[in-house]
Amino acid sequence: QAGNNMDKPQQNGESPEQTNNAQGKAATNNVPPVTPITKSINLAGPLIKKDKRQNSSRFNVSKNRELNALPLLEEASSNEREDLFIQKLRQCCVLFDFSEPLSDLKWKEVKRAALHEMVEYLSQHSGIVTENIYPEAINMFAINLFRTLPPSSNPNGAEFDPEEDEPTLEASWPHLQFVYDLFLRFLESPDFQPATAKRYIDQQFVLQLLDLFDSEDPRERDFLKTVLHRIYGKLLGLRAFIRKQINNVFYRFIYETEHHNGIAELLEILGSIINGFALPLKEEHKQFLLKVLLPLHKVKSLSVYHPQLAYCVVQFLEKDPSLTEPVIKSLLKFWPKTHSPKEVMFLNELEEILDVIEPAEFQKVMEPLFRQIAKCVSSPHFQVAERALYYWNNEYIMSLISENSQVILPIMFPSLYRNSKTHWNKTIHGLIYNALKLFMEMNQKLFDECNMNFKQENQICEQEYSRDFPAL
């Protein structure tokens, strides 16, 4: 698949944003999580079963659709080949109505065969992408790709279940697939010249490309992800503009619509871009983390794009550990109050952050952080409590806790001890016993003090309760 082969922009040898990954103890894998070809389950909102849908975008269907098969490129002489390639590109500017499956079958096949032939020829031969090809090829891509998307089948963001629901597929995909494939081969061709291409791939072209990320067809978004990433890598003059426009997509998503199909794919592109940021980080990039990425945690459809979002956040912290405190404070601010599956996602991300945190940064946030973890351990939802208690199986986190046990143990002890007696789930009892045992081995004296203080406070509470409610 096109989208699973994303080179990093800085590997093209042209990027001023060189990777500097000298930091970090537990550096994460420098490849963004791959966006699944079907959406992951959005755990927010009502589940609505949808039938398998196929819909066609609103193309301006060509009036004259009768196409004649042109000679094969392989059979043309070298001095005729460029003209023949241009003829085929122009032929492929003819658009068909795929909402009528049986219409124009013969001519649809002529176009499909021409597209397929150009894809194969471009991948096997060099010297094809000449200066005359650029305007013709980019015009053909624009005519075929840029169109009005069909209305959303899920305008209210109802929960998507990949086992029950089918994504809405683009009816014109038999042609669109080859157009995207040809676009990628064009961008990746050894003959591709950014200086020439930038005359045709401009800001307006990028804006229209970004609009397509809201396509409901995951196959199209997968191609778009790779196409935009290639453009970012090769056309340096468009980089700041692309980042700004992705920001705008996120702002609209967070504060206006809360509905967009391509957030995971855009975050996957950004994961590679962030990995290539030069050090020290620019203020613009820090603001992007704090003002755009972190508020994405608030949206109810977080589960659809959370792995890609968490990857981006961790990339930033590996680049600049001083961002750890504002990031963790933001996560605690946005922490879900009544949505247990979302809490599990936050706990997953928090562990990824703790895996790369510097000890000095950990000390700045450990008190509010472990107050929240104590609440999670007390959660009646056993998956939340279980996920929080798994932190005690992480060696690096345990080393941080051990170094700061004087602060952390008094925060955690009441929650651990109380739930060791009262939690309804037996698995949680075992995990709590393990955590208490580790704390006791860590600092026996402090453990005994916490135990004594807890029992004294508990006794005082019982006496006050008996005094206030004697009849009960």
Image: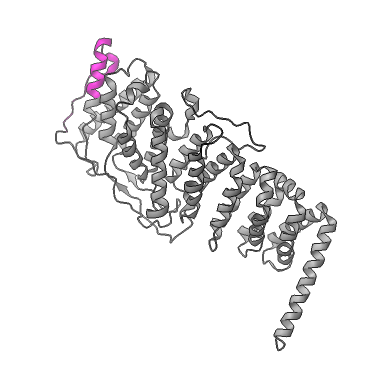
- Residue 322 at x, y = what percent? 61, 42
- Residue 429 at x, y = what percent? 72, 61
Q: Which residues are magenta?
A: 65-88
- Residue 14 at x, y = what percent? 46, 23
Q: Which residue is at a point 29% across and 34% down the rendered structure image?
A: 175
Is 109 on the left-hand or right-hand side of 394? left
Name the outermost residue toward the right.
445
Name the outermost residue toward the front.
283
Quarter occupied by the C terminus: bottom right
- Can residue 53 be found in the magenta stretch? no
Q: Which residue is at a point 43% across and 41% down the rendered structure image?
A: 266
Name the outermost residue toward the bottom.
471
The image shows residue 439, relative to residue 456, as above or below, that is above
Q: Which residue is at a point 54% across and 63% down the rendered structure image?
A: 338
Residue 319 can be seen in this image: yes
Quarter occupied by the N terminus: top left
Name the outermost residue toward the left.
64
Color style of the picture: one colour
Res 108 quadrant in image: top left
Which residue occupies the foreground of this view, 111 or 373?
373
Q: Which residue is at a point 33% across and 53% down the rendered structure image?
A: 153
- Can residue 84 be found in the magenta stretch? yes
